[in-house]
Image (cartoon, grey):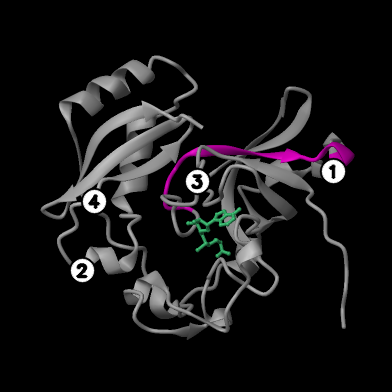
Amino acid sequence: MFTSEINAVAICRTPYKQKFGIPRQPGLVDVKGYVELVPELNNLDTVRGIEQYSHLWLLFCFHENLAQGWKTTVRPPRLGGNEKLGVFATRSTFRPNGIGQSVVKLHAVVQRKGKVCLEISGMDLLDGTPIIDIKPYIPFSDAIKDAQGGIAQFAPELMPVDYSDLAISQIQNYSQNSQYQSLQPLISSVLAQDPRPAYKKAKQDPKIYQVALYDLDIFWQVINNKINVIELKPTTV
Ligand code: SAM
C-alpha cells in the first residue's frame, strides 16, 4: 500500500464563496483569482521562471467534500442525473483521493500583503481551496488534437440572463468599489451556466436561488427559460 503525506503548497483565493454556482470546469468564466503560497513556501524562488507560461495546471483538494466520502458510480449532471458512470469516468468531486485538476490562465507573479501569489483567471475553485501542486501547462503535449470528450465533448449551452431594475441599480452602486471587479459580466457568466441541479431543469421551477460571489448573495430565478437576477444582498455570515 502506498502512503504519503501531501500538504497544501498554496491556497486559492477566488470570488466563489460557496460550491453552488461555481463553473463546472475551468475556462468557462473569466474572473481573476490568486494562488497564494503557504508560509513554508513563501519564496519567489519557488516560482522563478513561471511567467514564461501562459497557463498552469493546478492540482487541488476537493476539501469541502472529503467528509462525505465517495461512491463507485456517480450520476453526472450532463446526463440529466439519470445515468450512472464509474467515478473514474467522470470529473466527480467525490473521489477516493479527493483530488481535482484545472488549467488556469497565468497573468502575473505578484506580492499581496507580503505573500507570493500567482494572479490567475478562469478557475473553477472554491475560495480557500488547498492547492497541492502547480505545474506549467505545456501545449505540445497537454493539448491533444482530435481528443474524444465523451459526455463532455462541448462546453454546456448558455442561458440568457436578465436583470431587474433593482439589480441593475445595485450593481451600478457596487461597481463603484474596485473590489467588485466586472461584477455584472461575472454574474452573467456564472448564471448563464445554469447552476441548478439537472433534475430541476426538466420542468417548471419557481424556486428562488442564491449564489455567493465576493461578499454578495445574488438572488435569481428561472422564468420562461431565462435567468432573471432579482436582487443582491450583502452576505450575512
Ligand atoms: N476541473 C476540476 C477537475 O476536473 O478535477 C474540477 C471539476 S469539478 C466538477 C468543479 C466543481 O467542483 C465546481 O463546480 C465546484 O462545485 C466544486 N468545487 C470547487 N472547489 C471545491 C472544493 N474546494 N471542495 C469541494 N468542491 C469544490
**Amino acid type of disc 3?**
Gln
Q: Quadrant of ligand 1?
A: bottom right
Q: CA distance from mark 3 to mark 4?
A: 18 Å
Does mark 1's beta carbon lie closer than 8 Å to ligand 1?
A: no
Is residue 105 rendered to the left or right of residue 57?
Answer: left
**Disc 3 target residue:** 18
Tag 4–tag 2 contact (CB < 8 Å) = no
Q: CA distance from mark 1 to mark 4?
A: 47 Å
What stretch of residues is rendered in magenta? Answer: 27-41
**Disc 1 target residue:** 46
Q: CA distance from mark 2 to mark 1?
A: 48 Å
The disc at residue 207 is 4
Q: Residue at x 47, y 19 (%)?
A: 178
- Where does the N terminus fall, quadrant-wise? bottom right
**Amino acid type of disc 4?**
Lys
- Find numbered disc 3 in the image and state the secondary structure of the residue it sits on: loop
Q: Where does the image place residue 11, in percent across and percent down from the top left?
A: 70, 43
**Amino acid type of disc 1?**
Thr
Q: Vertical placement of 236 versus 122: above or below?
A: above
- Find numbered disc 1 in the image and state the secondary structure of the residue it sits on: helix
Comes first in the chain, label 2 or label 1: 1
**Amino acid type of disc 2?**
Ala
Q: Residue at x 56, y 80 (%)?
A: 87
Which is closer to the viewer, label 3 or label 4?
Answer: 4
Comes first in the chain, label 3 or label 1: 3
Residue 98 found in image quarter:
bottom right
**Disc 2 target residue:** 202
Q: Where does the image place residue 195, in percent across and percent down from the top left?
A: 35, 55
Comes first in the chain, label 3 or label 4: 3
Q: CA distance from mark 3 to mark 1?
A: 30 Å
Q: Vertical placement of 206 versus 162: above or below?
A: below
